[in-house]
Amino acid sequence: MFQNFQNILIRSFDNSFPTKLIGRTNISNNWITNGIKISCKRKRELYLLKRNSNNPQAIRFYNKYCSILKNIITEAKKMHIRHQIHHSDNLMKTTWKVIKDSTGATRPPSPITKINTDNKSIEMPDEIAQAFNNFFIHVVENSDNKQVDRNRSNELLTKTSNPEYTEMKVIPITENEVLNTILALKTKKSSGYDGISNRILKHCATIIIKPLSHICNSSLTKGIFPDRCKYALVLPIHKKGERTDRSNYRPISLILSLSKVLEILMHNRLNQHLNSNNIIALEQYGFRKEKNIDNAIFSLTNTIANALNKKQVIAGLFCDLSKAFDSVNHSISLQKLSHYGVRNTCHSWFKSYLTNRQQKVVISTNEGKHTTNWDTVNSGVPQGSVLGPLLFLLYINDLPDSLRKLAIPVIYADDTSLLIKATNAMELHDKVNNSIYHIKEWFAVNGLTLNLDKTNIIKFSSKTRKETSNHFSYLNTIKEMNNLSFLDRSKQDIIAEKPNRQFVAKTKQRLLCDLINVTLL
C-alpha cells in the first residue's frame, strides 16, 4: 500500500519538477537591494571621475557620497536582521546565526579527503564512503564490550522499577491530525532517498491527506512499519578531534519526510503513554519538553551546594559513552518497551520499526556525491529520526533507579553524571568505587561501552573549606581530575553558579541582541 502511494507521489513530483543542471551562481546578501546595487555602480563611476580629474569638488562629492551610501547599507542590513528575528520561530537559534554570519564564523563544512583505517590511509571518495559505512554498521562488533546479557539486563530492570505498567493503547489517527503534523514540519530542503523534502510535502498536504491518513492508521493497527521507510541516507558529521579518524564522526540519518510524519504520530502516542504513567526518570533532562540543559546544571550545582553547606565531602563521576546511540541492542530495547507497557500491536510496530533497517553513506566532494550500496543495520537507533531519541531515553531509563541508593544521577541524554556524598574522604573513596562497579556492570550488560579514558572523577570543595590534596585511582582505571567540563561548564563555573534560570535566559537574550548591534557597527 505505502509502496504504491510513494511511487505515485514520486512520479508526480518528477513530472512536475524535472531535474535540470544549472551553473553555480554567486549568492548575494539578501539585504542588498536593487537601489544599493545601482548606488554602488554610481560610486564606481564617481571614483573613476575623481581619480582622473583631481578636481577638489569631485573628491568632496565622492567622499560625501561614500559616507551616505555606507550609512544606507548599514541601515539596510539592520532592517534585514530585524526582519529575520521578528519572523523567527526560534529566537535564540536565529540570533546566533545572525552573529555568526556577521562575524564570518559560518563556514561551509570541509569535504572529507582522507580517512585512516586500521591498516591504511584512504583517499578515494568511494572507498572513504565505504569505510564509513563499514564502521557505522559494525560499531558494536568493533567495540570492546562483549558482555551483553539480556537476562541480566532484564533482572536489573525488573528489580528496580514498577513490574506492571498499563498497556499502551492504539489511538486512531484522524485526517486533521495528519494535516497538522505535516504543516508543523520544519521547512527544510533536505530529503531522503526519494528527493521529496518537507517543503514539497507541505505544499501537497491537502491533496495527499486522505490516502496518507489511511496508510498511517493501517500501519498502527496492523503493527507494521513500511519497509520503504526503513531506508536512510547517512551523512558523516565531524564532531571534534582528528578529521581522519572515523570515530570522530557522528552518523546523521536523512529519512523520508513521509516516514517523519508516521514517526511523529507514533511518538505523540508513546509520549502520552509515558507521561500518563510517569515512566521517564526524573533525573533525565535530555529530549524532554519541560527540561533542558539549564535544569540539569541547576540540579548538579544545587546538589553540590547543599552537600558543601552540610560540611559533607562530595565528588562527581562524569561518564563518557562510546557511540551510545549506535550501540542500542534491539532485542534489549524491545524487552524494555514491553516492560513499560508497549505490548501486542504496539510492540509489533516497534519491532518492525527496528528490524531490517537499511542505510548507505553519502559523502560530498568537489567532484560531486559518492555513495555506497545499501547495507543492513543490526543495532542502534537512527540519529536524525523522530523516535530515535525517545527510544534511547527508554533504553537507559532504569539506570537512575539502579544507582539511586549509591549516588545522585544527573543525566542529559547519554551524558551520565553521578554525584556521590560522604562524611569523610575514605568513605567517599569506597562509595565512588562501589558506584563505578555498578554503573560499569549496567552499561556492559546493556551493550553500552564506557570510555574509561574519557571518564573522570572530580572532588568539589568550597573556598572556605579545602579538602586534602590526596588523589585516588578508582578501580585502577579512572583517575581523579582537577578540572573538567559538564555540558560545557567547568568546575569553577559549576561551583560559582548561582542558578536563576529565568534571569540567565533573559540576560542571554539581552546580550545576544547587544552583540548583533555591535557586529553592525
Image (cartoon, grey):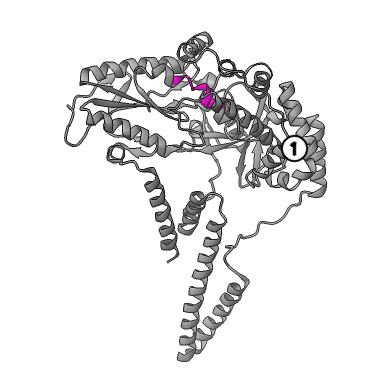
Question: Relative to 309, is 97 on the left or the right?
Answer: right
- Residue 137 at what x, y percent from top left? 59, 25
Measured as percent of width and height from the top left, residue 220 is found at: 71, 25
Q: Secondary structure at mark 1?
A: helix
Magenta region: which residues? 391-399
Residue 396 lies in the magenta stretch:
yes
**What residue lies at 79% left-to-right and 31% top-to-bottom?**
3
Q: Please name the residue shown 55% across and 61% down the image.
A: 83
User: In this view of the protein, which residue sits in the foreground, 498 or 17?
Assistant: 498
Residue drawn at point x = 45 percent, y = 90 percent:
56
- Residue position marked by numbered label 1 in the rendering: 175
For the question of whether residue 134 can be seen, the reply is no
Quadrant where the C terminus sits is: bottom left
Q: Residue at x 58, y 27 (%)?
A: 381
| Left-right relation of 193 to 121 | right
Relative image position of residue 251 (x, y in whole percent): 56, 33
- Amino acid under label 1? Glu
Q: Is residue 431 above or below residue 456?
A: above
Taking the image as drawn, is residue 167 in sight? yes
